[in-house]
Image: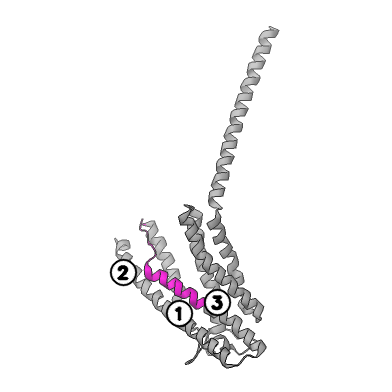
Amino acid sequence: MDREGAVLRGDCCAGRWRVRHTQGRQQARSEGARLADWRARVNLPNAITAARILAAPFIAALPFIGSPSARGIAFVLYVVAALTDYVDGMLARTRNLITDLGRLLDPLADKLLLFATLIPMFVLMAPLNDRFVPTRAESIDASRLQFQTPLGPVGLPWWIVAIVIGREIFMTIFRQTAARRGVVISAIGPAKWKTAFQSVWVGSAYFWFFAATTAANHKWSGATWHAFAYFNGTVGSLTMIVSVFLTVYSLALYLRRYSGALAT
């Protein structure tokens, strides 16, 4: 009886060990799957996109600090953010790292960066008689922060901001509506060119904030400085005009191509 009991106890212990071992292997596989899923989500392109999102508040706030260093940092941050917008997409495509999280974060980062730049640009560059602009607490003449061109200062009126932001909001809703109906709206050529011209326009404005503040502090007023100011202002003004035109034109193309499919 003792031997039989010992055998039974041994079989029972072995059975419990096998159950625990099986459960342990299942738990390890489950944890491994969760870890693999986490690594798939937190990849390099998604990390770069997340960094752009984190940089957006600084890009929005630093231009309001009227010092060359703050505005210079804002310009550098914007350039890095604009370049990484291309880099993260390229990495995701070439390394097959496209994820649902990336599809969510990338357009969010684009919208945040656009809003983060247009707010200080409008406040610092709007025409002086624009009723939508709060009183500026600026140490230098506010008109100097507008683009300087041979034809005079070129500011940023409220209606341009309304067109750019309104188009982005509309296209976001339009794409979501299309996706719910199984229609994928891909980026078209004019929209890609719009983004490129928009980046140069915003970059010119942010660099001008830095350069104009530095010039005011050092009292630069020579011919070389004026030539540079006119060059930067002309580039910024022309790219603004082209980007606004492409904003409206690309929207019209999207509506013409996809409104019929969504109406059915």
Q: Nearer the viewer, mark 2 or mark 1?
A: 1
Q: Can residue 98 be seen in the rendering of this structure?
A: no
- The residue under label 3 is 119
Mark carried by residue 162: none
The answer to if 199 sits in the magenta stretch is: yes
Number of residue marks = 3
Closer to the chain start, of discs 2 and 3, is: 3
The magenta span reads 181-202
Looking at the magenta stretch, what is its main secondary structure? helix
Q: Say which quadrant the C terminus sits in.
A: bottom left
Three-letter code for the amino acid on which mark 3 is drawn: Ile
Whole-percent x and y of residue 4? Answer: 66, 9
Q: Residue at x 51, y 71 (%)?
A: 114
Eyeballing the image, is 65 above or below 173?
below
Q: Mark 2 highlights which residue?
A: 256
Name the outermost residue toward the right.
2
**70 drawn magenta:** no
- The answer to whether residue 262 of the structure is visible from this angle is yes
Q: Indicate the secondary structure of the residue bearing disc 2.
A: helix
**Disc 2, disc 3: CB below 8 Å?**
no
Three-letter amino acid code at disc 2?
Arg
Q: Which residue is mark 1?
A: 239
Residue 104, image x, y percentages: 49, 58
How far, Cα to Cα, is label 2 from label 1? 25 Å
